[in-house]
């Protein structure tokens, strides 16, 4: 599982410099929708920009956390290195499970926000 996330993160790491300005634009649009702005008088863009901000933030997080994984444990190494690699890979597994659960919850939140938006 973490190897698949690593492949996905390597692809995302190529465009991570585009993700930060995109997240900033979504955050600015969200803030402009919240304050009393004459151009954005209604809340038409609020839910969409907030949802876009969350998705771009998730993609940026994946591109920063998962491209470099600890190597697999080799039996030729001493016990400290094996323990260190196992602990680091275990922590990456926990991060991967947390990331996937956050992604599923973001999918559910996106569905609910889109449903509310189009009603």
Image (tube, helix red, strand yellow):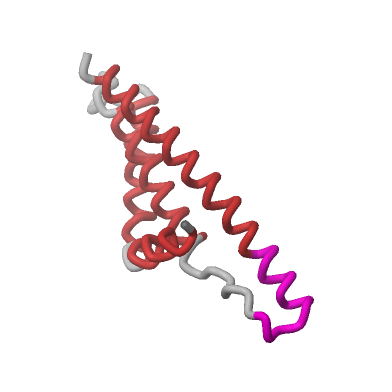
Residue drawn at point x = 53 percent, y = 47 percent: 97
Q: Is residue 42 magenta?
A: no
Q: Relative to 71, is 105 on the left or the right?
A: left
Q: Examine the rendering and report whether any part of residue 41 can be seen.
A: no
Query: Quadrant of residue 27 in the image?
Result: top left
**Which residue appears farthest toward the top when viewing the image?**
119
Q: Nearer the viewer, residue 79 or 7?
A: 79
Give above or below for 74 relative to 105: below
Residue drawn at point x = 39 percent, y = 28 percent: 109
Q: Is residue 76 magenta?
A: yes
Residues rendered magenta in the picture: 75-88
Give above or below for 49 relative to 66: above
Residue drawn at point x = 35 percent, y = 34 percent: 51
Which quadrant of the rendered structure holds the C terminus? Answer: top left
**Which residue appears farthest toward the front when viewing the image?**
75
Q: Nearer the viewer, residue 23 or 105?
A: 105
């Amino acid at each position: 599982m973490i190897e698949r996330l690593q492949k996905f993160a390597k692809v995302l790491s190529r465009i991570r410099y585009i993700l930060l300005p995109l997240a900033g634009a979504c955050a600015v649009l969200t803030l402009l929708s919240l304050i009393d702005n004459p151009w954005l008088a209604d809340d038409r863009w609020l839910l969409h920009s907030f949802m876009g901000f969350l998705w771009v933030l998730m993609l940026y997080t994946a591109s920063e956390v998962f491209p470099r994984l600890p190597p697999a444990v080799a039996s030729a190494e001493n016990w400290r290195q094996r323990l260190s690699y196992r602990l680091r890979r275990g922590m990456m597994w926990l991060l991967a499970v947390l990331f996937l659960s956050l992604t599923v919850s973001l999918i559910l939140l996106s569905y609910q926000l889109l449903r509310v938006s189009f009603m």
